[in-house]
Image: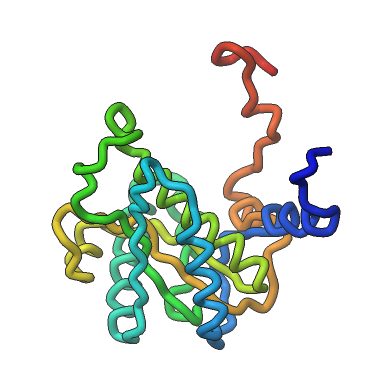
Amino acid sequence: MSEHAFSDAERAAVYRAIGERRDMRHFAGGEVAPQVLTRLLTAAHQAPSVGLMQPWRFIRISQRDLRGRIQALVEQERVRTAEALGERSDAFMKLKVEGINDCAELWVAALMDKREAHIFGRRTLPEMDLASLACAIQNLWLAARAEGLGMGWVSLFDPQALAELLAMPADAKPVAVLCLGPVEAFYPAPMLALENWAEQQPLSAMLYENQWGERA
């Protein structure tokens, strides 16, 4: 074992947070203590980023009426998504897809403006700024689970409409509406699997060796 490895207990805690992280939709109200919120956002800010550009921006939604307007945008897209799903539309409409009005904290995670000035690591893969933001969100998610808090990533919204609602610059982009806060319990498995919407695939199905399609 590497001399730089964590202790057995520390490693177990890391893997537990990863294994028990869930995309939560059911929240129990309450609040998140300021010092805990600071720890969570610090964890997000410690994420890796291409060219150290740190493209993440987090907007706290503290106005109740603004929450309602965001929830309305999500509901509009939920209906449009159901229409696009055709024969699965009824099943989709039965799913709970957000907890915006129930969570203790609501945040919008967005990409910064003036991103095109950053070409280190993005010249051929400009979407790496999005990958960097996703890493920050994952850090926040895992830290929240370690703190005993649930988090849900909501992506059902029109980015332009949400950007206008939040007075964002034209070249910035909202990527996620994040519901955060206490929960009664964590799902024992991903909610979509529990609802029979989709099946989890085994790791072996995702592994290739040397060439695409060659099983490892």
The residue shown at (50%, 57%) is 46
Instruction: For the C terminus, give its image quadrant.
Output: top right
Q: Where 124 falls versus 74 (above or below)? A: above
Q: Where 99 falls versus 201 (above or below)? A: below
The residue shown at (39%, 64%) is 177
Where is residue 203, by image quadrant?
top right
On the image, the x and y values in percent for residue 80 come to 31, 55
Q: Would residue 77 be seen by someone viewing this image from the given angle? A: yes
The residue shown at (65%, 42%) is 200
- 11 to the left or right of 42: right
Q: Which residue occupies the extreme left position in the image?
A: 170
On the image, the x and y values in percent for residue 14 come to 72, 55
Where is residue 4, by image quadrant?
top right
Where is residue 76, by image quadrant?
bottom left
Instruction: For the N terminus, give its image quadrant.
Output: top right
Q: Which residue occupies the extreme front position in the image?
A: 3
On the image, the x and y values in percent for residue 154 come to 43, 61
Q: Where 107 falls versus 190 (above or below)? A: below
